[in-house]
Amino acid sequence: MIGFLKPAAHKALLPDEKITPTYKRLRMQVFVGIFLGYAGYYLVRKVFSLVMPDLVNLGYSKTELGIALSGVSIAYGLSKFIMGNVSDRSNARRFLTLGLVLSAITMITMGLLPVATSSIAIMFALLLMNGWFQGMGWPPCGRVMVHWFSIRERGTKMSIWNVAHNVGGGIIGPLAILGVAIFTDWHAKLYFPGIIALVVALIAWLLIRDTPQSCGLPNIEKFKDDYPDEYSDKFEEEMSAKQIFMEYILKNRLLWSIAFANAFVYLVRYGVLDWAPLYLEEAKGFSIQESGWAYFAYEWAAIPGTLLCGYLSDKVFHGKRAPVSIIYMVLVMVSVFMYWVSNSLVANSIALICIGFLIYGPVMLIGVHALDLVPKKAAGTAAGLTGLFGYMGGALFADIAMGAVVDKWGWSGGFIVLLGACVAAIILIGISWYQEYKGHNGIH
Ligand SMILES: O=P(O)(O)OC[C@H](O)CO
């Protein structure tokens, strides 16, 4: 690992009386750090979809814009897996900040330089770069999560942390409106969130710490007296890329099956989200303000939905992830149908809010499940594998194929694809449930 990114060195243990107060303070501090940091990543993740109506007005087709937008998903999916593996061997504080700064600079450049939106090829290349830098966000958060929070508290903590996706994603609608109001320039939808993301990167840098051991604290398992099954001292040793992949990823049947399911969950997630501004403005006659607020409501509705999903999974289904994911996906299907056929502004907004409320539950549970299936030094790679399928399969299809399907068969064609994806996700999550029932439980 290059020097700057090397995991922070372990320090001598603090005196006994300082361990508990320091641990408590730093756990809160790093949690806020990764929460704000990841929300910051979302400020500049998919902000391009908000300028798509402006680009359509300039003469670009939906197919072309879908191709440009796919740059994010292609690079993000690959990067989340590859950089996830690098992140497993890197200092989370530096890694997360570096990725966010690079991603913000890319979107600021895209907004400020007229040449950056002058052709599909240039937009695609810049979005490809942005997607790669974006892939440096989730894995260090996963690394912080598994080093600072023990296995039996991780479900709850992850569901709270997951809300960062929606805080970041939900703010970009109003932020775009504010940016355009301040600068009277639609390009501000790109550079204004980028500038805010740079500020967030600085805050994340100030708050995040790599591991408890690098702050003079014992490992979290010892501190909480909460050990995963098969835990050994080996779990504290940094591993090589090959070792992580060969020993903990390749043979992990359950991990692969949730990764496949994730492709379809993500097809629905991004098939709805990325096309919402254009669909609402073009097919339903929303104004830019109305679609910006609907987009905002979609993300914020996810917050109670995600928290409820984590609660139901832990308390009602005793830690099982599949049953509640299946219930959520069935309800997503009903809501997607409503979103398709309703005609009023209110009914469309309600349908979109219902999809937002529901879809992040399965998204979150698949991530939690991936972390649980491997030792903590392989967490980034495991989550990266599910991300690879989610983005290279689902989100990529949502960007490229949805654009082409809608251009050819209209919005109805797009909705048939989304409903089919709901069915496929339900079947695949059902298969992972069956595997668990048969006794497969990842590597533990
Ligand atoms: O990579 P993202 O941003 O889609 O997030 C993944 C989810 O957090 C999985 O739990």
Image (tube, rainbow, N blue to C red):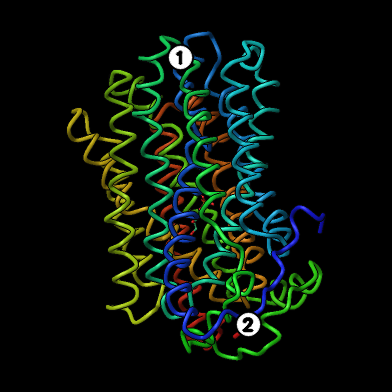
Cβ atoms under marks 2 and 1 closer than 8 Å: no
Could you tell me which secondary element the residue under label 1 belongs to?
loop
* In the displayed structure image, the side of residue 431 where residue 348 appears, left or right: left
Q: Residues within 10 Å of mark 2 (few under 14, many from 20)?
A: some
Residue pictured at 30% horizontal, 44% vertical:
300
* In the displayed structure image, the side of residue 343 where residue 396 appears, left or right: right
In terms of image quadrants, where is residue 329? Answer: bottom left
Q: Position of residue 283 (x, y in %)?
A: 33, 22
Which of 229 and 391 lies nearest the eye of the viewer? Answer: 229
Q: Position of residue 294 (x, y in %)?
A: 29, 33
Q: Say which label, 2 or 1, has the lower sequence index.
A: 1
* Residue 443 marker: 2
Q: CA distance from mark 2 to mark 1?
A: 49 Å
Residue pictured at 41% horizontal, 9% vertical:
184
Quarter of the picture containing the C terminus is bottom right
Q: Position of residue 299 (x, y in %)?
A: 34, 43
Provide the residue designation for mark 1.
186
Quarter of the picture containing the N terminus is bottom right
